[in-house]
Image (cartoon, rainbow, N blue to C red):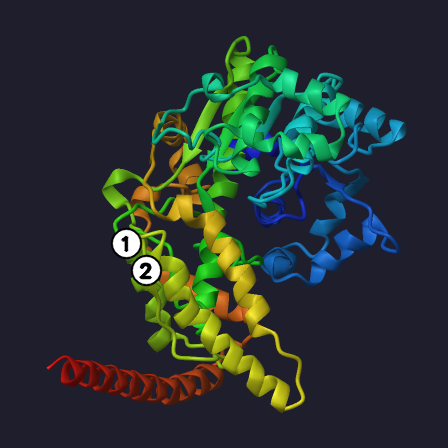
């Protein structure tokens, strides 16, 4: 017997943007595996020499769909690609496809975004803000529309530290309609040069353009059955479709992997600051749950004047600090070490801005030159110095989020979960109070090892990693002893001179 959420999606046609992204894949997998959705149209950006249908076909080899295809081998046939590009002024969707979507679609899940923090303003504005406005215009043409879910970010209003499930247009220096109108009149170069003035207190173009997108919704989406989902930083899957599954190296998972490889040894992170992390399967489940709630509300009453906002982040009773996150990361040294490490995994955290460049020189840059020299002498291409240049640039971008704490109100999310049936709460779980962080990170580290490190999850491979890490640990302690001896010798020499 179907649950409420399963009945909500039965025989429905869904239009999903951001389908090739981390969250998008998990949403598609969960929809196909747990519901009898009729069809999922997905917006796919054409690539030269690659048919959009071929991009969907390759999903059959993706680990994220393995569980689905075991139970429903033909499931991906219900996924139909639509050629389009959020960078285009008309979303790149043909007139025929627009008519098709307008006549068939009942549910829109708009998740397409560029998540690069340092994206040029004109690009981030086009993908994150203008495309949202164009999607709303397209949704108004959909004759059977029952729900529009806009996937935003919990950090769209990061200029304040206690964020409620409200709109905050007052934090923008200029309204979305004025910024979009300006973008049409000036060159991309000139718009990018205006970045500092437009962003104001926002730390990067990502959070700024996501805030603008919410302002677009507030102004343009009146009368639509629409809600906004704001997830915190999305990390590896907790349970489904594969425990620990991840396919990208953004944010915290990049830090985990860098530490595990012995590459990242120092970072600008405050141990005491709270980490706002949520597993990707929790986010997919809440996406489907708030879709159900939006449809349910629309069938029983008129659409709300102001769209509901659902936030998902760790709760106060089960929070995790960056220090705890790092300790869990270092547990991987004994539980599931990689077989490819350049040094023994460890990390030191610095919160003093002026001290980081000095420490980074001795922890990263100087060893990198020795490493690259060894590569050059062996006839291979030096690479580590360039790697550390990218790492330091990334750490600079992530710094503001690793040294501060935010509080996210989740009253609407909690109310939604209470309204769900017991079976729906089991199938579409997103209760952050029940998440065991220690157990979670053990699986996340194994997933990182398998899916990012491409190392098999076999006892033989793990044994090989443990053998390597014992050798690196010995070398690490020998180097520490040598450096301490040199420091003491230098200190003694100075004392003798002064005395």
The residue lying at 34 percent from left, 68 percent from top is 330
Secondary element under disc 2, as helix, strand or loop, is: strand
The residue at the point 71 percent across, 18 percent down is 181
Image coordinates of residue 435 in percent, x first then y, are: 33, 49
Front-lying residue, 488 or 13: 488
**Residue 497 percent coordinates (x, y):** 17, 83
The part of the image, by quadrant, that contains residue 492 is bottom left
Of residues 283 and 135, which is closer to you in this image?
Answer: 135
| Residue 457 visible in the snapshot | no
Count of numbered badges drawn on the protein: 2
Kindly check if marks 1 and 2 are in contact, taking CB atoms under 8 A apart as contact: yes
Numbered badge on residue 104: none
Label 1 sits on a secondary structure element that is loop
Rendered view: 225 above or below 163: above
* Nearer to us in this view, 13 or 394: 394
What residue is at 41 percent from the left and 75 percent from the top?
336
Residue 194's quadrant in the figure?
A: top right
For disc 2, the neighbor class at 10 Å (few under 14, some 14 to 19, many from 20) is some
Q: What percent of the width, then of the height, locates residue 106?
A: 68, 25
Pointer 1 or 2: first along the chain: 1
* In the rendered image, the vertical position of residue 498 relative to residue 5, given as above or below: below
Q: CA distance from mark 1 to mark 2?
A: 7 Å
Q: Is residue 425 above or below residue 355?
A: above
Decide if residue 139 is on the left or right side of residue 272: right
| Nearer mark to the viewer, of 1 and 2 | 2
Residue at 60%, 11% (x, y): give it: 222
The quadrant of the image that shows the C terminus is bottom left
Q: What number is the disc on residue 349? A: 2
Towards the viewer: 267 or 210:
267
Q: Residue 57: x and y, percent?
A: 77, 56
Q: Is residue 489 visible?
A: yes
Pointer 1 residue: 271
């Amino acid at each position: 017997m179907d649950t409420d959420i399963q009945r909500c999606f039965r025989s429905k046609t869904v239009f999903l943007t951001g389908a090739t992204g981390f969250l998008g894949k998990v949403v598609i997998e969960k929809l196909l595996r747990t519901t009898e959705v009729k069809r999922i149209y997905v917006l796919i950006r054409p690539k030269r020499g690659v048919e959009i249908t071929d991009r969907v076909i390759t999903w059959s080899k993706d680990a994220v769909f393995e569980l689905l295809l075991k139970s429903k081998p033909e499931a991906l046939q219900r996924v139909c690609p639509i050629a389009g590009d959020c960078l285009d002024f008309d979303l790149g969707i043909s007139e025929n496809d627009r008519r098709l979507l307008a006549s068939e679609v009942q549910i829109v899940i708009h998740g397409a975004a560029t998540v690069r923090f340092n994206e040029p303003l004109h690009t981030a504005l086009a993908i994150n803000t203008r495309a949202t406005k164009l999607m709303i215009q397209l949704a108004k043409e959909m004759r059977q529309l029952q729900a529009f879910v806009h996937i935003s970010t919990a950090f769209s209003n990061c200029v304040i530290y206690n964020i409620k499930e409200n709109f905050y247009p007052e934090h923008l220096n200029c309204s979305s309609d004025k910024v979009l109108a300006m973008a049409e009149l000036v060159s991309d170069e000139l718009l990018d040069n205006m970045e500092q003035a437009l962003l104001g207190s926002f730390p990067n173009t990502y959070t700024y353009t996501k805030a603008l997108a919410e302002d677009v919704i507030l102004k343009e989406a009146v009368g639509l059955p629409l809600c906004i989902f704001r997830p915190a930083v999305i990390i590896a899957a907790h349970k489904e479709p594969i425990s620990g599954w991840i396919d990208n190296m953004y944010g915290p998972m990049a830090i985990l992997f860098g530490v595990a490889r012995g590459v990242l040894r120092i970072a600008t992170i405050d141990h005491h600051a709270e980490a706002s992390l949520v597993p990707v399967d929790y986010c997919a489940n809440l996406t489907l749950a708030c879709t159900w709630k939006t449809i349910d509300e629309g069938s029983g009453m008129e659409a709300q004047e102001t769209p509901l906002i659902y936030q998902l982040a760790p709760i106060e009773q089960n929070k995790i600090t960056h220090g705890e996150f790092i300790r869990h990361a270092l547990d991987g040294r004994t539980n599931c070490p990689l077989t490819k490490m350049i040094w023994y995994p460890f990390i030191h955290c610095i919160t003093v801005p002026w001290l980081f460049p000095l420490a980074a020189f001795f922890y990263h840059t100087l060893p990198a030159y020795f490493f690259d020299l060894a590569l050059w002498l062996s006839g291979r291409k030096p690479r580590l110095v360039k790697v550390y240049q990218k790492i330091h640039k990334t750490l600079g971008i992530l710094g503001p989020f690793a040294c501060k704490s935010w509080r996210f109100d989740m009253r609407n999310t909690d109310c939604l979960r209470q309204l769900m049936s017991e079976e729906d709460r089991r199938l579409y779980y997103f209760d952050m109070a029940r998440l065991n962080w220690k157990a979670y990170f053990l699986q996340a580290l194994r997933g990182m090892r398998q899916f990012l490190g491409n190392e098999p999850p076999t006892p033989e491979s793990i044994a090989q990693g443990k053998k390597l890490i014992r050798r690196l640990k010995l070398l690490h302690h020998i180097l520490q002893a040598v450096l301490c001896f040199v420091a003491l010798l230098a200190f003694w020499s100075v004392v003798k001179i002064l005395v």
